[in-house]
Structures are given as C-alpha cells and as structure tokens.
Image (tube, rainbow, N blue to C red):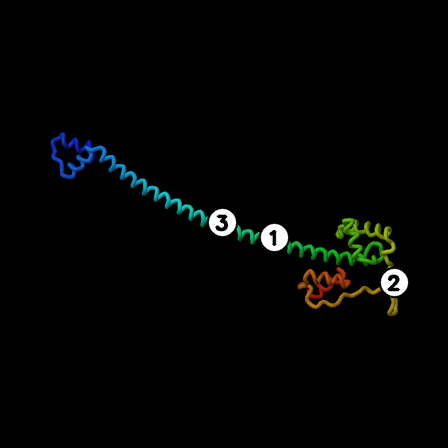
C-alpha cells in the first residue's frame, strides 16, 4: 500500500497489520525509501540495457545475414548476366556469318548471271565493290545499274562467256561443288561457307534443298 493509503487507514482508526506497519515504518524514513527505490531503478535500468544490447546484437546478426544473401544474389545475377551477354554475342556472330554466307552465294550467282551478259572474274572482289556501294541485292534496278557501271569502270574484270557448241572443249562449264556429305537442312554456317568457297551458287544450293524435299 502507498503512504497515503496507510495514513488514511490510521485516521479511520483501523488497525494495521504487521506488514502494513513495517511498510509504514519504511515510508516514514525517506532516506531508506529513496535508497530502496534507487536500487530497484538501477536494477531495472541494468535489465533494460541488457535487453537493448541483446536487441542490437540480434539486429546486427540479421543485417549480416541479409547482406550475405544480397551479396550472393548479386553474384549470381552478375554470372547470369555475363552468360547472357556471351550467348547473345555468339548468336549475333552466327547470324552475321549466316547472312554473310548467304550474301556470298548471291554475289557468286550475280557474278555469272547479271544484266551485262558477261561474267565477273572475281566474285570476292565483286562482293567488296557491292558492299562499298551499299548495293541492296534484292533491288533489281540498283543491281542492274551498279553492274553496268562496274563494267564500264572495270572492263578487264568482265569475261564474255564462249557460246556452247559440240565437242568436249566447247563453252565454259561452271565449277561444280563437291557433293554434300549430309542433308542440307542440317548444314551449319561453316558448311554453307565451305559450299561457297568450292564454287557453289544460289541455284545449286536451292537445287540441293529441292532434292531433299
């Protein structure tokens, strides 16, 4: 009970129990009461500091685990990003090789069959010249005007094919590439490039596809 409650009881003439009398005695001596309250306060403060320290350690542990998890996730993302970039670069490289191979096929065919009626002697050089002029091989008018212009500029590079006739030596026979060793549909870009190097043309490539259809 509080000091006020005890004093109220005394004023009413009610007897105090031994415990109440002892409590009144303590409350009546401020110095002792102050020391008792101070001791309790210090104890509670010590317990509070202990809990705060425990909470700080727990928070630090949680932050450390969270940082480790974040670092691991960042590491995995970086690895995946690197793999994606590598695969993307390889894909672009293969697409570029394929496009270049197909263009080479078209240029080889154009070197033989073009509006000038003559054969261009060096298909690789023709490809260089067409690239230099930024010629769209699917634009017939542009191809025609460019080939006629090249014939005027480099007449020495054009050969008029001999007309065919009877006899073993009559006419010019186009070089035939080596027979395919595997289905054309399974050819890689390297196979297509090899076909071109061996003198293959667009018509021959398309003919091989048709024979397998």
Front tag of 3 and 2: 3
Is residue 117 found left or right of 7 in the rendered image? right
Can you identify the residue that label 2 sits on?
163
Callout 2: helix, strand or loop? loop
Q: How many C-alpha atoms fall within 10 Å of the one at disc 2: few (<14), some, or many (≥20)?
A: few
Q: CA distance from mark 3 to mark 2?
A: 77 Å
Q: Residue at x 71, y 66 (%)?
A: 211
Q: How many C-alpha atoms fall within 10 Å of the one at disc 3: few (<14), some, or many (≥20)?
A: few
Callout 3: helix, strand or loop? helix
Q: CA distance from mark 2 to mark 1?
A: 55 Å
Question: Is 117 above or below relative to 15?
Answer: below
Sequence-earlier tag: 3 or 2: 3
Can you identify the residue that label 1 sits on?
85
Q: Residue at x 13, y 30 (%)?
A: 12
Front tag of 2 and 1: 1
Viewer-proximal residue among 11 and 171: 11
Q: Which mark is residue 70?
A: 3
Q: CA distance from mark 3 to mark 1?
A: 22 Å
Is residue 124 found left or right of 22 in the rendered image? right
Q: Quadrant of the C terminus?
A: bottom right
């Amino acid at each position: 009970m509080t000091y006020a409650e005890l004093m109220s009881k005394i004023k009413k003439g009610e007897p105090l129990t031994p415990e109440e009398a002892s409590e009144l005695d303590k409350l009546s001596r401020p110095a002792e009461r102050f020391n008792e309250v101070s001791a309790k306060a210090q104890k509670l403060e010590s317990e509070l500091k202990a809990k705060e320290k425990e909470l700080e350690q727990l928070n630090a542990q949680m932050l450390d685990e969270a940082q480790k998890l974040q670092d691991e996730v960042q590491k995995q993302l970086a690895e995946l990003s690197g793999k994606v970039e590598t695969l993307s670069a390889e894909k672009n490289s293969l697409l570029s090789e394929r496009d270049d191979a197909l263009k080479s096929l078209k240029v080889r065919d154009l070197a033989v069959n073009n509006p000038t009626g003559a054969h261009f002697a060096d298909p690789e050089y023709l490809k260089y010249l067409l690239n230099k002029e930024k010629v769209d091989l699917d634009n017939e008018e542009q191809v025609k005007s460019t080939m006629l212009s090249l014939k005027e500029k480099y007449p020495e590079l054009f050969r008029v094919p001999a007309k065919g006739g009877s006899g073993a030596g009559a006419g010019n026979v186009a070089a035939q590439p080596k027979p395919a060793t595997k289905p054309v549909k399974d050819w890689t870009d390297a196979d297509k490039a090899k076909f071109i190097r061996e003198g293959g043309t667009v018509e021959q490539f398309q003919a091989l596809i048709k024979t397998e259809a």
